[in-house]
Amino acid sequence: MVTTSERLTQSQRSENRRIRFSAYLTGITFFCLIGGFLASRFSGGQAVGFVAYLLACIAGGWSASKKAWQELKRFRLDIDLLMLIAALGAIAVGKAVDGAVLLFLFSLANTLEEYALGRTRQAIRALEKLRPERALVLRGDLEVWVPVEELAPGDRIRVGPGERLPADGIIVEGESAVDESALTGESLPVDKAPGNSVFSCTLNGNGALLMEVTRPNSQSTLARLINLVERAQTEKSHAEEFTQWIKQRYTVLVLVGAAFALMTFLALGHSFGTAFHRATVLLVAASPCALVISTPAAVLSAMARGARGGVLFKSGAAIEALARVEAMALDKTGTLTQGKPRLTNLAALRCDEQELLSLAAALERPSEHPIARAIVAFAEQKGAVTTQASAVKAIPGEGIQGEIGNESYWAGNLRLARRSKAIISSDARAALARFEEQGCTTIILGNQGILGILGVADTLRPESKVAVQRLRVLGLKNIQMLTGDNARVARAISEELGLDEFHAQLLPEDKVALIRELRRRHGRLAMVGDGLNDAPVLAAADVGVAMGGAGNDVALEASDVVLMSDNLSRLPWAVGLARATRRITLQNLTIGLVAILTLVTLTLSAHLELPVAVIGHEGSTVLVVLNGLRLLFWRSSALEG
Ligand code: ADP
Ligand code: MG
């Protein structure tokens, strides 16, 4: 069986081999060119010189011919073909030197380009190399070293202080601060204790840990992350497909244009040699190499930079969309707040507190909702977990219901209480108002009537306020909050953060409709959520951004951009990077266009020598690639000021 890591290193190795091969070919071309140049200095060396130039053309045009042929077989023309035709043209009119120089520079530029983009891809795969090769597994009373590829869910592993974790899993014993920066870009270590999830490749701090593997190696968060990035790079976005289409048309246009120019020059009375030569120069000058590489060079670098900073862009189109966002809608629970509510208030109306807690805990036990976990945790702490519920059913956006000892109970918000036809007495109403004024989400528990009310409080993330301010600095016109929670809590948070608007008491389907409405009102919109129950909401926005990608599979699937860490400050960072990427892409397109226009104009108006056209053409290509690579070193410093 081939594991992910082996597959990666295989593709990495073949990529390295390809780059080395084209470097050798470029080197050979260079030496043949020098040899030909020296030989033709001596009298009688002309023939030797010509052979040397010819050899240079063959070495320099080798890769181009292969690519051009592959495209031709699919009835497609490409730039490599243009270059080959130009070189052959030059040789045909006795300018073998020019042909050799052209192919040398073309092959040099291609090698540089491949090398640069290869480095970018490897920047992402470098993560894989951090992973240890083997793990110390407990087998009965023995401890044995096992290659990580053979780890299976359920295996128990010892991880010593300062070691990298070999797999995704859950801590069974021990406490430690784990550095998750490789995965999340978050530099502060995260405290881990028994029950917490940990991830492959993260770095253990000072504690010794015993962990249980939860996922085989090929499905670890890291492996999937790398997989997604690789897929994002190979899958062509719509924009790229469009570029491809243009490139096809454009290549034909250049060929036809060159033929037309040849005829025009002849008609103007130039000799065939001169006319042919100038048409060849035109062919080179008009070739769109720089234009074609302008977007991928920037997008690949941005993806690598993002991955290192804990932000996963799922496609080039996602980067583009995030860069152009004008408004942003953020989910409250788990996004602006920590999503780890605690039970803070309790009002038993028609039973005692222990009974209320016991009933609530029984209903909420099967639920994954943060509110449910808060209630169960509190009940456990008070020793009030005494009964069990059956036929439990979650009602999205409202609450939960189930059977406890032949009677049906429900727990949830006012909407659910009304649907259950419970009469809301004045003491219930008073408790609701009191709890909500203190910033609590209220949960009403009842059967026929209301038994009691629980208040659960969630705290704002410490970084939320700064994150919102930075989004403002980035020029976002409108920032909104969406929540299923009550309006009083929503207002308090919205005012604290200085948001433009808030929308409370939304059902999941209301959120989808609201997103459509907000797009109409405010333009391009990003929706930021935890992806847990808002996958359709994320999909309804122009860009869906999910938080806490490490450990949250749904978030990885449902969104366009994933913030791997559970830290909202990555959001303005991601927007900043996306904007920088868009800026550099536009710069690149401009460089490419200006180069073509200048060279073509010069060719048509003045007599441009072939080597000059070639240098201008290849120079702009290399410039565009290097400009794109700047994104690898992008920093958010522009945001701090
Ligand atoms: P949010 O938009 O804040 O993520 P949800 O859509 O998950 O909120 O839930 C909306 C509201 O529905 C909650 O504020 C709560 O009142 C109620 N609710 C949802 N699930 C439960 C549950 N398991 N127990 C009690 N109340 C719940
Ligand atoms: Mg939610």
Image (cartoon, rainbow, N blue to C red):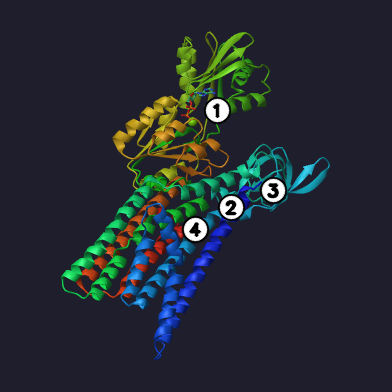
Could you tell me if residue 17 is visible in this image? yes
Name which of mark 4 and mark 1 comes first in the sequence: 4
Image disc number at residue 8 = 2
Q: Is residue 71 above or below residue 418?
A: below
- The residue that mark 4 highlights is 120
Name which of mark 4 and mark 3 comes first in the sequence: 4
Amino acid under disc 4: Thr
Amino acid under disc 2: Leu
Foreground residue, 158 or 233?
233
Foreground residue, 190 or 379?
190
- The residue that mark 3 highlights is 148
Camera-near label (2 vs 4) is 2
Name which of mark 1 and mark 2 comes first in the sequence: 2
- The residue that mark 1 highlights is 369
Bin the neighbour count of mark 4 within 10 Å (Cα to Cα): few under 14, some 14-19, many 20 and up: many
Q: Is residue 219 above or below residue 13?
A: above
Between the C-alphas of marks 3 and 1, the distance is 33 Å
